[in-house]
Image (cartoon, rainbow, N blue to C red):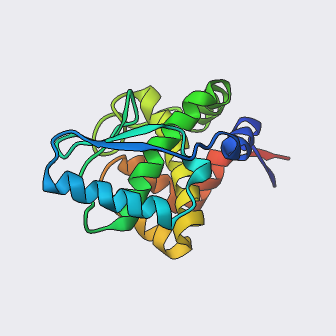
Amino acid sequence: MKKRASLPFIVLLLSITSYGQAKIDISLKNGSPGEIQTRDQLQRLLTTYDLSKLLFTKSILIDEKAIPHSHPTLTLHTRHLKDDDLLLSTFVHEELHWFLVQKDKETKEAMKDLRALFPKVPVGFPDGAEDEESTYLHLLVNYLEYRADRELLGELRAKQVMEFWSSDHYTWVYKRYWNERATSAIYCSSTS
């Protein structure tokens, strides 16, 4: 059995380098010590790692009371003050939402392919996202997050981050990457 990558997914992967921005503004919701520390931690990570091809937003809000989200303003919380890898992965995850918005046509085509591969997906915490559409979207976002983490952190640390996420939130989605058959199904289709 020969495998080939799904065309919409290949387009998404290859085009990720074409939209990066260089400068971002980080603001604080409350100005608390935790938010200040998280801002400083993120600024350090932005200078430590080459994230240029993964930056799609111009501003970030740090809000200790928020759940991280991408829209309308990329917002991070203060939960990962003691873990650079988890904060970096969270940041990359939210940036990738912006990337997929810019690649709307390809994203919709890839999600259509995922619907065929996974006709039923979980909805709701902790296994899935808030609705079915968002769970399919997170199959893409989380896979791209894993690839970016692997490039930035190396295989071992990226695997440790994914293992943490797979018991934290979007658990069904993140666990797809530890099942070899499901992982290849996400980005490959079978041909005879």
94 up-or-down from 81: above or below: above
Percent x, y of residue 115: 57, 31
Residue 190's spot in the image, x, y percent? 76, 46
- When asked about the image quadrant of residue 82, the answer is bottom left
On screen, residue 82 versus residue 88, left or right, reads left
Q: Who is closer to the viewer here, 101 or 146? A: 101
Outermost residue, bottom side: 156
Q: Which quadrant: the N terminus?
A: bottom right
**Residue 47 seen:** yes
Q: Is residue 91 above or below residue 66?
A: below
Among all residues in the image, which is located at the extreme right? 192
Is 149 above or below relative to 7?
A: below
Instruction: Tell me where residue 89 appears, x and y as whole percent.
Output: 43, 56
Residue appearing at x 40%, y 35% in the figure: 70
| Residue visible at 47% across and 50% down in the picture | 92
Q: Nearer the viewer, residue 90 or 123?
A: 90
Q: Nearer the viewer, residue 33 or 68?
A: 33
Q: Residue at x 30, y 54 (%)?
A: 39
